[in-house]
């Protein structure tokens, strides 16, 4: 291992078993085989087993902060526990240079019957601190935890917030060479989170390397030099943080689209029809007029709606909208606004309605078109359908808000000029 490398992971795999009974049986069998020098079946999957981490390789150099991102069940925490030595890999090799400190489960190891004071020493020992080190850090830990007069009270009487603060206070006062952090910044109130972020920034500067797991991509963006994106235990991307976050959003949108197409995602029951009109194929057209299921953010958005009328209809108008996956209407337009675009005589047969929206600039995400057809004179509804095929807006960056728009920023200082002082 090179001198400037703090962590090196080479083709590491770790498997779990879905059945507890089989897991125990496999464990006993593996121990027996290893004892007899026969070797276990670490490279093969047996019944009910699956790979939580599969052929993962990366390295973290001294001074670097690596982010590990991915959806739930992607193998992030398993990877961190492998680095911390809680688990051993079934395949591959792990090399870690230096003392490891882990913030994997805040408050893990606390004994409910012991006081806060006693648990500081117990938890400190679990994290690799000796009594002298805890003594030296004790006042700082108590001040950081801010548990008031409850220091000598058994922790079973602590609120969840107090327990979190005490556990974090002990953990961040370890001075490790390698710091492993797993989703611990999502706890506590805003003031405590800010204090924790400041402390983590200090630890990052002192540690040789940091590995940070979080679903909060803003924290990842601000704290990490590079990221790896895991999906089902495999690395889907490794590189610069900004690009990795973009790939995470792209993968997430793709999964949502597949889920919806398989009828496991969003469903809207709102579809009613008088029998006079029936909507069929719905979708997007790209700039060349070709049907597509996705467009890039900022590109013109043109939707088409194919329908069939079973009789001639007079004074027909449409309400067309687009909503996001949270069921928010992002765009809503009516063809009859101010008396415009009323289709006065629509004959029996098949038709296609094309609606070109003027630069909506929707943020990247998954969207659903909606449509209703009504009579402009009587206002009777022929059909409304909010359960149409979804489409994707692709693009870089996080899916925030509803639309992308330019802006100008200015900061003015408001002084006391002209105000009378008392």
Image (tube, helix red, strand yellow):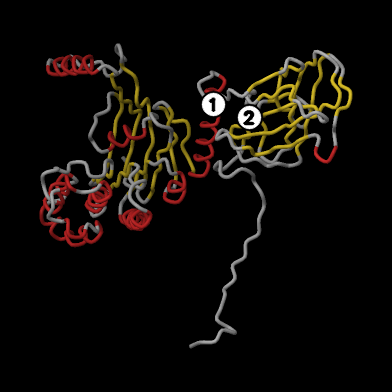
- SS at badge 2: strand
Q: Position of residue 356 (x, y in %)?
A: 78, 34
Separation (CA) of disc 1 from disc 2: 10 Å
How many labels, in total?
2
Q: Is residue 218 left or right of residue 44?
A: right
Q: Nearer the viewer, residue 32 or 331?
A: 331
Asked if disc 1 and disc 2 are in contact, CB closer than 8 Å, the reply is yes
Q: Position of residue 121 (x, y in %)?
A: 13, 51
The image quadrant of residue 286 is top right
Q: Residue furthest right?
A: 345
Q: Nearer the viewer, residue 105 or 246?
A: 105
Q: Is residue 25 left or right of residue 72?
A: left
| Residue 266, label in figure | 1
Residue 133 against residue 155 in the figure, above or below: below
| Residue 368, label in figure | 2
Q: Quadrant of the N terminus?
A: top left
Q: Position of residue 199 (x, y in %)?
A: 32, 57
Sequence-first disc among 1 and 2: 1
Q: Position of residue 192 (x, y in %)?
A: 33, 55
Residue pictured at 62% horizontal, 26% vertical = 390
């Amino acid at each position: 291992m090179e001198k400037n490398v703090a962590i090196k992971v080479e083709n590491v795999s770790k498997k779990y078993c879905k059945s507890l009974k089989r897991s125990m049986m496999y464990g006993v069998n593996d121990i027996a085989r290893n004892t007899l020098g026969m070797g276990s079946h670490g490279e093969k999957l047996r019944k009910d087993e699956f790979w939580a981490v599969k052929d993962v390789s990366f390295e973290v150099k001294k001074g670097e902060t690596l982010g590990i991102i991915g959806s739930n069940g992607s193998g992030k925490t398993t990877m961190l526990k492998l680095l911390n030595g809680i688990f051993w890999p079934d395949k591959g090799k792990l090399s870690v240079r230096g003392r490891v400190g882990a913030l994997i489960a805040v408050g893990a190891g606390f004994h409910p019957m012991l006081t806060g004071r006693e648990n500081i020493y117990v938890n400190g020992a679990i994290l690799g601190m000796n009594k002298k080190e805890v003594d030296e850090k004790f006042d700082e830990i108590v001040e950081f935890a801010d548990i008031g007069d409850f220091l000598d009270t058994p922790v079973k009487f602590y609120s969840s917030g107090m327990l979190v603060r005490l556990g974090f206070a002990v953990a961040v006062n370890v001075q490790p060479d390698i710091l492993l952090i797993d989703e611990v910044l999502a706890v506590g109130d805003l003031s405590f989170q800010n204090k924790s972020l400041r402390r983590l920034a200090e630890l990052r500067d002192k540690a040789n390397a940091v590995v940070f797991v979080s679903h909060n991509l803003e924290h990842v963006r601000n704290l990490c030099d590079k990221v790896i994106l895991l999906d089902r235990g495999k690395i889907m991307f490794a590189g610069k943080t900004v690009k990795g976050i973009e790939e995470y959003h792209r993968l997430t949108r793709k999964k949502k689209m597949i889920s919806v197409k398989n009828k496991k995602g969003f469903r809207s029951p709102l579809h009613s029809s008088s029998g006079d009109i029936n909507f069929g194929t719905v979708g997007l057209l790209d700039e060349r007029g070709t049907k597509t299921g996705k467009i890039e953010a900022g590109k013109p958005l043109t939707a088409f709606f194919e329908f069939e009328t079973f009789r001639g209809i007079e004074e027909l108008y449409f309400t067309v909208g687009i909503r996001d996956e949270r069921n928010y209407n992002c765009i809503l337009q009516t063809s009859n606004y101010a008396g415009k675009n009323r289709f006065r005589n629509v004959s029996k047969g098949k038709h296609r309605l094309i609606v070109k929206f003027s630069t909506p600039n929707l943020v990247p995400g998954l969207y659903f078109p909606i449509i209703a057809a009504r009579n402009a004179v009587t206002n009777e509804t022929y059909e409304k359908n909010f359960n149409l095929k979804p489409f994707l807006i692709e693009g870089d960056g996080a899916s925030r808000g509803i639309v992308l728009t330019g802006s100008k920023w200015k900061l003015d200082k408001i002084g006391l000029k002209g105000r009378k002082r008392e």
